[in-house]
Image (cartoon, coloured by chain):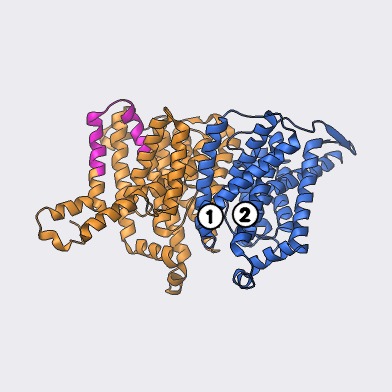
Chain colours: A orange, B blue
Amino acid sequence: MTRRMPVRQSLLGASSLDLLLSERGAALVAFTVLALLPVFFSGYVIYILPQYMLFGVLAMSLGLLWGFAGLVSFGQAGFFALGAYTMGLAMKWGGGIEPAYLGLLLSLLIGGVLAAVVGYFLFSAGVRGAYFVLITLALSIMVEQIAVSQSQITGGWNGMFIDRMSLSFGPLGKVSLFEDAAMYYLILPIVAAIYVILYTLTKTKFGKVLTGIRENEDRLISLGFDASLYKTAVFAISGAVACFAGALYGTHANFVAPSLAGVLFSTEVVVWVAIGGRGSLLGVLLGGILVASFSNYLSAITPEYWQLVLGLLFVAVILYFRGGVAGAVAHLVNTRRAK
Amino acid sequence: MSTALSVVVDATLITLILALAAFGLAIIYGLVGVINMGHGAMLTLGAYLTWAATTAGLPFLVSILLAASGVAFVGLLLEHIVIRPFYDKPFDTLLLTWGFFLVSTEVIKIVFGTDLRNVANPVPGAFDLAGIQLPAYRTMIACFSLLLIAGSALVFFYTALGIKIRALIQNQEMAWLLGLDVSRMYKLVFVTGSFVAGLAGALISPMLSVDPYIGNIFLVRSFFVVIVGGIGQLLGGTLIGSFLIGGSETLFALFTGQVFAQTVVFALAIVVLRFRPHGVLRAR
């Protein structure tokens, strides 16, 4: 299955082990485990996990930017919150078509278009590095401030309630997603599909150009690539993904408040991605799911110390292991292969 | 007439207080190029140390000096342990100082708790200026801010130390060849910036309720002040940047709500950064 078949594949079992240790094999295992979880658990775990999977998608939207294009955005939470508000307003307004579809479609569009406009505005002038970080941080603060100040639309500080969506499948009838298990099995395949799409994207020529920009932007430009267009495109994709995940999150959690766009949540996303390992979309996805789960579990026991540990881990990752957990695992696998 | 005057006075006070809050960042970012995302945490720490010292019964002036020294010490540790090898990699300093923000915020929460703390206003009351009530403490802080910036400019332009720092910014290699201890100068500038940030947090603490995220209000704004004013333009840059980011907010707030005015200012700041990435003072 893997394109880069190792030389020692003739050894019995080696190829299946290598598949397991490749990113695709690991992804297969991870999604299978997630798919089987409702068999063994019920109640709160099954209620809350889809939200963490969506956090994982949010993390992937940053992982794509940071790991592959070298762009660090501190504003992904802003897109996420924007998606949740879009969903809430679409559900409230209803309109002619199914509100859930409208909300999901609009969130993709709004996230993508907004990111494309902002991205092109900035990248065409050569804004990069720290300036991009600050501007995206400001963007997420602006989303928060608008959500607070336009209280007649958004509910201000109190936030906004969002109904669970129900999806109609034409002649097949309507599926209410009020049940947690139903919602779980709707969101899991969506998360898996987003992962596959983004993973495939990084393997295309587009993905290779992005990596080139990350490594040496000036060289790519002199080779004739319009770096600002590529960066705008990847930022638009990332914005659309984050916004879409936010729309699903809003309808799953039934609630959105301005703090979803705030500095603190934006920060958390950066920490998930750094710890998960920004070079691997799977690492980032699992980083988001696991760190959010641990945070929830440990916040009941020792919230401050857990956050402190996360902060120290973040510094350690920046200082010593650039690749985060996924990078460390890949390193171990490679050393094993080299033996 | 008196409303117009009170708006001008208000804008001036806010400009100068924001300049004070941003000045530590202007020193660290502007002079040694460390993108200090921990600036907000330094302000917060200064505020909490002031609360702790005044609650312990120390006089206010002693408290703010202790608080600023405490933050300077933390800055020294940060520089020595983490930042030192990264002066030539500004983007890494951004991530590392962000990590500092995360860690120090949690330490503050563990030590001081998350309840709101209040530092008693040392100079309560107001005085009258041509029919306008000026809050006494804010006015004093605004004047102090002006003095601090002017004093720094004096050091920067008229002392041997200032010459060394300017040499360092202009041509680090040449300064080193001429016998300047570059790493010691960097450390000195970083610690001075931390001291000023701690002092700003200490002085601002009586104006706001102190919570673990108090510095966040100033983090992005301080960066905008420094970049819009022009990185390295300590004197004029900080003042003009503060006026454009802080003072103009007062003017916008005349027409819209306070929160929405902030949004407008942020949007304008982003547009300015796009077209004048080196600040409004410097030609491209």
Image quarter of residue A98: top left
Res. B190 mark: 2
Q: Is residue B238 above or below residue B205?
A: below
Decide: marks 2, 1 in contact (CB < 8 A)? Answer: yes
Q: Main secondary structure of the magenta part?
A: helix
Rendered residue at 67%/59% (across/down): B230
Residue B217 percent across, percent down from the top left? 62, 41
In the displayed structure image, the side of residue B135 where residue B255 appears, left or right: left
Q: Would you say residue A292 is visible in this rendering?
A: yes
- Circles 2 and 1 on the same chain: yes
Give the SS element for disc 1: helix
> Which stretch did the figure color magenta?
A30-53
| Mark 1, residue position | B83
Chain hosting mark 2: B
From the viewer's perspective, tell me whether residue B57 is left or right of residue A1: right
Badge 1: how crowded within 10 Å, few (<14), some, or many (20+)? Answer: many
Residue B66 at x, y percent in the picture: 68, 40
Report the quarter where the C terminus of chain A lies. bottom left
